[in-house]
Amino acid sequence: MAVLVSDTSVIIDLERAGLLDEMFLLPFEFAVPDLLYARELEGELGDRLIALGLRVEELTAAELRRATGVNRQHQKLSVPDTFAFALAESRTWALLTGDGILRELAVAEQIAMHGVLWIFDQMADGAHVQFDRLHGGLTQLSAHPRCRLPANEVKHRLTRFAG
């Protein structure tokens, strides 16, 4: 089963969309680095994610060195994001992120990478969620003031999920 290493933004987006539980119905395993979990997810949300099946992975010494190097080269990336990058790169897992800088780095380093809209597509294609729920969730997410999804991509999917 493919493993996707997520940053916090995708998890938060799916929570805002009311589709976090449904993400774990997909035929993937989801993982986060231990530092990201400790800094950004631990508590009620983290406990819920663990119960749903989230894996919390500890970086090896080599992965930690890589994360530190990436952080020095890309100071706009958060330390948890560099941990997610190093974990995905080292273990050849796909990266699940909404962060623009992290996405650019993944492309530059030829690491498989997806975003939250890809997760919506996977839910729709696998018939894991009814289209009306996807439409409602994406509508809710796109209306959030911190939503940074491309409007044309959101519109395309809303049309698809409408009927």
Image (cartoon, helix red, strand yellow):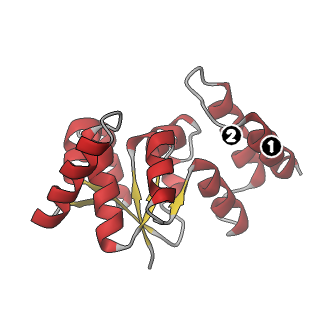
Q: Which amino acid does label 1 sit on?
A: Leu
Quadrant of the rendered image containing residue 18:
top right
Crowd rating for badge 1 (residues with CA inside 10 Å; few <14, some 14–19, many 20+) = some
Image quadrant of residue 55?
A: bottom left
Q: Residue 158 carries which label?
A: 1
Q: In terms of depth relative to the viewer, which is nearer, 5 or 15?
A: 5
Type of amino acid under label 2: Leu
The quadrant of the rendering that contains the N terminus is bottom left
Where is mark 2, residue-wise? 138
Q: Could you tell me which residue is drawn at 82 percent across and 46 percent down?
A: 156
In this view, 74 is above or below 50: above
Between 46 and 38, the one lying in front of the other is 38
**Above or below for 17 versus 105:** above
The location of residue 101, given as percent across then percent down, is 46, 41
Q: Is residue 103 left or right of residue 60?
A: right
Q: Do the residues labelled 1 and 2 touch (CB within 8 Å)?
A: yes
How many numbered tags mark residues here?
2
Q: In screen coordinates, is 148 left or right of 162?
A: left
Q: Is residue 135 above or below residue 109?
A: above
* Depth order, front residue of 65/156: 65
User: At 46% from the left edge and 57% from the top edge, which residue is drawn?
Assistant: 106
In the rendered image, residue 128, in percent from the top left (x then y), is placed at 64, 64
Residue drawn at (39%, 42%) of the image:
8
Place of residue 39 in the rendered image (x, y in percent of width and height, measured from the top left): 22, 37
The picture quadrant where one finds residue 33 is: bottom left
Q: Can the viewer see residue 50 in this picture?
A: no
Neighbour class for label 2 at 10 Å: few (<14), some, many (≥20)?
Answer: many
